Image (spheres, helix red, strand yellow):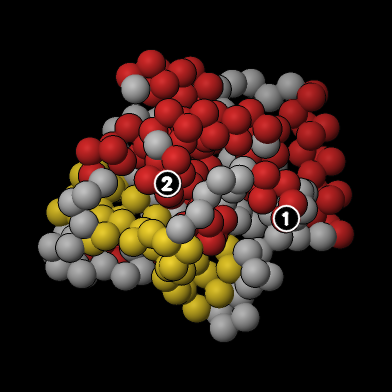
Amino acid sequence: MRIHVGGYGFQGLAAVEHINDLIGKGEMILNGLAGYYAVISETLGENKAMSRLSEFVKRFFKTLKVMDGFTVSSSLGLSYRLQKVRHCRIWSRQNRVFESDVRDFFLEGVSGTTNFRAEVFDLEERTVKLFSGMARGVAASCISLPGLFPPYMDRYVTTTYLSQIPVSFLSDGDIVLVNLRDPSSGRLKTASDLLFQSMEVRSLNYAREMLSHSKCQLVRVSKIVCSDSAFDFLEKLRKRL
């Protein structure tokens, strides 16, 4: 039995509170921030994992907020709009905001092998794969978000943009943490918002289509996490440890 855990952007944090209860029940297939936390928790412990995850969100908050798109819940001021313009200029020239050495900083101390796997999109072969083996590589694959860091090994990116959660390798009897965003809650003000929503709807449809063709145990995540609530949510999780 496999356990599929992940989520797009800040919504991936909502899966974290379920992970510790699922570890040990089967092979885990991961993506996004939830996947990063799971690997760090396995290798360095829950407290270190929560500390690393919180530091990661704090360090890249502005970029993650822009990447979260139209789901930002508070009113968007001038500062956000300027950040969005700045990031768009960077992305027009290159495929990342930060270099791989910055990603490596958040992988310090992660070593050994793991039974966890990261669901990735292989940019060279243009197909979805499972990345396994060394824990450091699995964790790196989970946080190789397109636009944030370069692809891992220059070819692998996490599948949060494709399907939000890992659903490309489902088998009957698997457990799937259904942690999907609700695109209807966003405010559409610009053409880029409309394009982003169309992309998100496609990813949701893909995830739901894959789920409809398998007999999996679905664990639905009701908590909604966005940029407004990310830090408060992480603090609540930290206090539970």
Q: Residue at x 21, y 57 (%)?
A: 26
User: In the displayed structure, would residue 214 be above or below residue 25?
Assistant: below
Left or right, 66 with reference to 27:
right
Residue 171 at x, y percent in the picture: 20, 69
Q: Which mark is residue 181?
A: none
Residue 116 at x, y percent in the picture: 36, 59
Residue 66 seen by the camera = no
Q: Specify the amino acid type for callout 1.
A: Ser
Figure quadrant of residue 76: top right
| Label 2 Cα crowd, 10 Å radius (few <14 / some 14-19 / many 20+) | some
Tell which of 162 and 103 is nearer to you. Answer: 103
Tell which of 203 and 30 is nearer to you. Answer: 30
| Label 1 Cα crowd, 10 Å radius (few <14 / some 14-19 / many 20+) | some
Left or right, 205 with reference to 20:
right
Image quadrant occupied by the C terminus: top left
Figure quadrant of residue 22: top left
- Residues at marks 1 and 2, CA–CA distance in whole angstroms: 21 Å
Image quadrant occupied by the N terminus: bottom left
Figure quadrant of residue 86: top right
Residue 163 at x, y percent in the picture: 43, 59
Left or right, 49 with reference to 122:
left
Q: Residue at x 74, y 29 (%)?
A: 80
Q: Which residue is mark 2?
A: 43
Q: Residue at x 56, y 79 (%)?
A: 126
Q: Residue at x 75, y 60 (%)?
A: 95
Residue 56 at x, y percent in the picture: 60, 36
Q: Depth-wise, is mark 1 or mark 2 nearer the camera?
A: 2
1 and 2 marks in contact (CB < 8 Å): no
Q: Specify the amino acid type for callout 2.
A: Thr
Q: Which residue is mark 1?
A: 100
